Each structure stands twice: as structure tokens, then as C-alpha cells.
Image: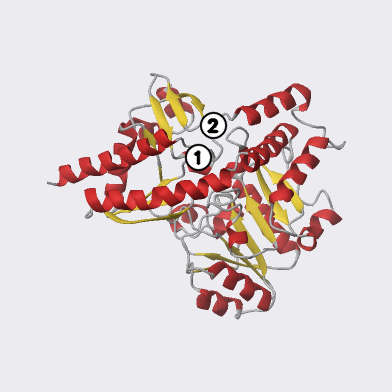
């Protein structure tokens, strides 16, 4: 299996797999993944997809039922499933974001948001340094990292990047031109190493956009639907953007799906011409069944509240472990809800920590734009024993690393 991956998919991916012992996943349920050799792993990675856990019975049943009835539609006739999914999603979205365009991934959702801004005459794009918005060409233009951008230049023109959390820098760039700007921002920068901005930052960004008549897109692909311990990061700040993009958790860990939500005014170009922005699999009934079921699970099982409570316990516990066991190895532990970053002294230490965690049966992720930071995105369905298992793995990993330095 490893050889097949290396031969037909990516030899680089094959080399990466070798670093982790050539583990091959076989099945997943809730917060746990089982490999083909029978080993069980606690999944605190998965790039934030498994907020409701893997294979939630209610979501799987909804998808299976829909697959048997109508997996894909003709796209000529209407289907009820996409309308019901849109109703479910807008029912928990920030007030006023009543229109939805569904897509297959977060980067597609970002592209739709940028196209809406362009359709409204907002030609200048402004995003934040170290932000991450995807790797299709438009979204990549916003993803401010030369490592991913340089091989594919030229990208979109008229794109500026300003420091995250710096409203003075944003104000200066907005003042450079007329009302032709679109600002794209994350409530918390995940791939930048879980950077939490100062309180009130997002409100200040929204105020600047209003002052300069700029279009505001809030990227909640990672942070939305409860990951931060609130339904949406922008709602926690009292902000309603022109466009909000979401994904990751929206899939329920079962089907690839994302969404671009917009105010009626912002969405108007897509209303005027329904073929202006289309995609073959946008609103596919099988994915829409997952959306409706996922929103219901997050709401009915109180996963947003569980994420807030779990994060409130995990953050101080992790900080205490790091301070006690490896004060010289960990620079900082930060986060909100169940989006947690552990910043090691350097990228090498982060890589070693990730390997130690896998050895102890816990899956975590590195950060694409901050190599010294390992991220934890555990599901909100963690049991008390799984929570303890995570903390024990972190403690054991740091002890092992500290010993190797002596």
C-alpha cells in the first residue's frame, strides 16, 4: 500500500509516511482511528474536520439514506435536499447571512467569496500575513506564504498583505485607494500557529471596512461551527461580514463540503445570473444530507458548549504539563476552544514532538505557516478517558524529548 501511494500519488507523501512508520488507516469511529495492523490512535488532528467525531451514526445514516435515493442531481431540476441544507446552515449562521453557495472544499468557498467581491467592483484584495485561505490560484494569492506562492506566480494582481492584529496597518492600506477593496481575515489564524488576536480586533477590522466601504470576507473554514467554543468567531466579536466561508467541520467527517454564506446584497450577482459561478458537484444531494445532519448533531448534542468546556480544561492543563516537564522546549501554548497550538523552540523540536505523539498513539498536525507549532484539533466528543490519554501523551512526549537533551 505504501509503495502504491509512492508510485501513483506522491513519492513525497510516501517518504512522509515512512517517517511515521508506514501506518495505513483502516477505520475510524468517534475520536479514534484504527490502523491495518490493529493499533488504535486518538485523533486530535485531521485538520479540524472531525469536530463531531468520525462516522457519527446520525450523519452516516443520513448520507446512506440519501445515496440510495438521489446521490447526485440533474442540476436542471430543483432538489429538496440542498434547500433544506441551506435552511439548516443559515439557521445557525450569523444574522443576515441568509444566502448560501455550496462547494466541495474551503478553498473553493474562498474563491466564491472573492468572486462576489470582484462582482461588486472590489478589485484590491487585502489579507493578513501568515494567513491561510487555500491553494487554488485565487485563494493562494491570499495565502501569504512565498513557499506556496512562488512556484505558481504570477498570481492575482493587486493583493496586499498586512500584519494580523495590526489595525493601523490595515487602515493605511485601505486609505491608499477608493472603495474598491476586499478584506479577507480569519478570527484566529490556524495555520499560522494558532494566533489569537487581541480582543476587539475583528470588530475594529469590520469598522474599518465600513468606514472605507470595503467588502469583508471572514474565513471560518477552520474556526466555524463550534471549533472556538462559539458557533462562529465573528459572532463572538459581534461582527457580521458581507461573506463568511466555512468548511472542515461542516462535512461531519463524512462528505467533502464547504459553503460561502453571504448577505442578500453581497449575493446579488449570483442571483442575477445563476450560471455566473457554478460547479458540477455544488449542492450535491449526498453532501447536503451530511450538512443538514451535521448542523443538527452540533446543535442537539451541545458540541459548541462541549468544545468551550473541553478547551477551558485542556489549555491550562497543557500549560501546566509543559511548564513542569519541559520548560525549555515549549515556548507557548495558546488557543481558543478546541483549536490549540503548542509552539516548540524550533521546527526540529516540533517534528520530534509530533513523532513522539504518534508513537504514543495520538495524531496531531503541524502548522503549514509556522513550522515550530504543533496543532491540536480534537473532536468535541472526547470522553474523559480520552482527554486524560491526550494529556498523558503530551507529558510522555515532552519527558522523552527533555531526556534526549541531557
Element carrying mark 2: loop
Neighbor class of circle 1 (other Cα within 10 Å; few <14, some 14-19, many 20+) is: many
Residue shown at 60% from the left, 37% from the top: 252
Q: Which residue is mark 1?
A: 379
Observer able to see residue 19: no
Q: Which residue is mark 2?
A: 54
Residue toward you, 396 or 8 = 396
The picture places residue 172, in percent across and down from the top left corner, at 55, 79
Element carrying mark 1: loop
Marks 1,2: beta carbons within 8 A: yes
Q: Which mark is residue 69?
A: none
Q: How many marks?
A: 2
Identify the residue at the far top of this view.
Answer: 37
Residue shown at 46% from the left, 44% from the top: 377
Identify the residue at the far right of this view.
Answer: 77
Q: Residue 35 sits in which quadrant?
A: top left
Amino acid at each position: 500500500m505504501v509503495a502504491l501511494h509512492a508510485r501513483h500519488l506522491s513519492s513525497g507523501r510516501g517518504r512522509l509516511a515512512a517517517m511515521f512508520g508506514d501506518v495505513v488507516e483502516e477505520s475510524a469511529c468517534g475520536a479514534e482511528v484504527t490502523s491495518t495492523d490493529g493499533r488504535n490512535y486518538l485523533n486530535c488532528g485531521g485538520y479540524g474536520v472531525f469536530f463531531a467525531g468520525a462516522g457519527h451514526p446520525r450523519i452516516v445514516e443520513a448520507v446512506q439514506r440519501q445515496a440510495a435515493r438521489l446521490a447526485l442531481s440533474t442540476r436542471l431540476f430543483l432538489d429538496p435536499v440542498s434547500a433544506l441544507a441551506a435552511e439548516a446552515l443559515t439557521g445557525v449562521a450569523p444574522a443576515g447571512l441568509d444566502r448560501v453557495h455550496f462547494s466541495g472544499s474551503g478553498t473553493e468557498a474562498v474563491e466564491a467569496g472573492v468572486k462576489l467581491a470582484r462582482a461588486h467592483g472590489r478589485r484590491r484584495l487585502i489579507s493578513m500575513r501568515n494567513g491561510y485561505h487555500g491553494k487554488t490560484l485565487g485563494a493562494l494569492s491570499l495565502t501569504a506564504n512565498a513557499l506556496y506562492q512562488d512556484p505558481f506566480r504570477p498570481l492575482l494582481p493587486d493583493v496586499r498583505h498586512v500584519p494580523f492584529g495590526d489595525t493601523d496597518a490595515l487602515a493605511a492600506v485601505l486609505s491608499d485607494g477608493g472603495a474598491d477593496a476586499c478584506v479577507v481575515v480569519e478570527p484566529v489564524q490556524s495555520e499560522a500557529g494558532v494566533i489569537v488576536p487581541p480582543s476587539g480586533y475583528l470588530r475594529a477590522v469590520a469598522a474599518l471596512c465600513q468606514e472605507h466601504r470595503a467588502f469583508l470576507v471572514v474565513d471560518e473554514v477552520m474556526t466555524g461551527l463550534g471549533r472556538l467554543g462559539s458557533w462562529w468567531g465573528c459572532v463572538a466579536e459581534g461582527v457580521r461580514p458581507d461573506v463568511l466561508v466555512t468548511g472542515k467541520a461542516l462535512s461531519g467527517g463524512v462528505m467533502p463540503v464547504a459553503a460561502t454564506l453571504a448577505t442578500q446584497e453581497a449575493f446579488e450577482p449570483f442571483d442575477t445570473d445563476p450560471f455566473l459561478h457554478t460547479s458540477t458537484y455544488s449542492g450535491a444531494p449526498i453532501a447536503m444530507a451530511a450538512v443538514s445532519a451535521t448542523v443538527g448533531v452540533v446543535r442537539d448534542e451541545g458540541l459548541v458548549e462541549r468544545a468551550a468546556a473541553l478547551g477551558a480544561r485542556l489549555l491550562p492543563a497543557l500549560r501546566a504539563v509543559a511548564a513542569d516537564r519541559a520548560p525549555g522546549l515549549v515556548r507557548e501554548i495558546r488557543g481558543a476552544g478546541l483549536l490549540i497550538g503548542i509552539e516548540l523552540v524550533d521546527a526540529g523540536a516540533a517534528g520530534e514532538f509530533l513523532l513522539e505523539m504518534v508513537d504514543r498513539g495520538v495524531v496531531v498536525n503541524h502548522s503549514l505557516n509556522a513550522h515550530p507549532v504543533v496543532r491540536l484539533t480534537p473532536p468535541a466528543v472526547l470522553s474523559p478517558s480520552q482527554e486524560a490519554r491526550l494529556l498523558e501523551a503530551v507529558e510522555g512526549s515532552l519527558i522523552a524529548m527533555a531526556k534526549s537533551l541531557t
